[in-house]
Amino acid sequence: MSWSNELRRIADAADIERLRSYWTAYRGRMFDTLAAQGPFDRFTGADLYACALLSAEIDPRAGVLLLDDETQPFSSLLRGIPTDVSIRTGRAAEVLADGSPASLLYDRLRGLETIGPTRASKLLAVKRPGLVPIRDSFVEQALGATSSMRWWKPMLEAWSEPALGDAVDRLRERAGDAVPSHVTDLRLLDVATWLTVEARDKRAVGSPGTPAG
């Protein structure tokens, strides 16, 4: 099944009460608040904390470099990534293309010790939550993409299909006030996907688990 079809299926089947629970009880709900409030052109301690809220703690050695822009010019690359482009727009492919500031920043982040694909994606997502798709084991599992070397390109291809955007629009309409208005479409679908896998895993082990993500 294509990523677009699977993500559309997840959006159409999303449990609204579970979404409501996420944005009232799960610690990850504050990721979206911090993403909406932070400066667009530099990493802050709040960004590092936001990643920790999604179970992607930033090692202090990497954190110091992220916050020390005099030696690690992340800000110049962040300023090159538009703030008004979402993954649903036609410009997204250009903004996330190889050699773009976003791509160069991702590579620079990956070059830091202890920063793997998940942490790099969450650091970028907290700065551009409507543009950069989060990659973690839950979403990989949902898409059957644990061995995929690329992430942005197939995700861009999925979002380029109007049917996926329509499914997310329907989900947001069904969710109503269960989802805060500042939550981006990309993040809404990410949470719906995460919750779908979490619920599947809980059924498999017969455990209620704890709200961590």
Image (tube, rainbow, N blue to C red):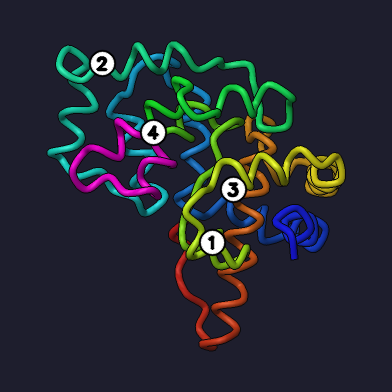
- Give me the C-alpha separation between circle 3 and circle 1: 22 Å
User: Could you tell me which residue is drawn at 59 percent across and 48 percent down?
Assistant: 23
Could you tell me what secondary structure mostly forms the magenta stretch? helix
SS at mark 3 in the image: helix
Q: How far apart in space, not on screen, are marks 2 and 4 (Cα)?
A: 13 Å
Viewer-nearest of labels 3 and 4? 4
Mark 1 to mark 4 CA distance (whole Å): 19 Å
Residue 140 numbered mark, or none: 1
Going by the numbered disc 1, the residue's amino acid type is Glu
Callout 2 secondary element:
loop
The residue identified by callout 2 is 73
Task: Give the CA distance from mark 2 to mark 3.
Answer: 34 Å
Query: Residue 16: where, in percent of width, then height?
Result: 75, 57
The residue located at (53%, 25%) in the rendering is 36
N-term-proximal mark, 2 vs 3: 3
Q: Which residue is mark 4?
A: 106
Give the Cα distance between marks 2 and 1.
31 Å
Residue numbers of the magenta segment: 106-123
Pointers 3 and 1 in contact (C-beta within 8 Å): no
Please name the residue that numbered disc 3 is placed on: 23
Q: Residues within 10 Å of mark 1 (few under 14, many from 20)?
A: some
Looking at marks 2 and 1 on the same chain, the residue that comes earlier in the sequence is marked by 2
Q: Position of residue 159 (x, y in %)?
A: 73, 41
Name the spot of residue 133 as percent of width and height, x first.
Answer: 55, 41
Picture quadrant where residue 47 is located: top left
Quick one: which residue is furthest to the front in this view? 99
* Vertical position of residue 202 compared to residue 16: above or below: below
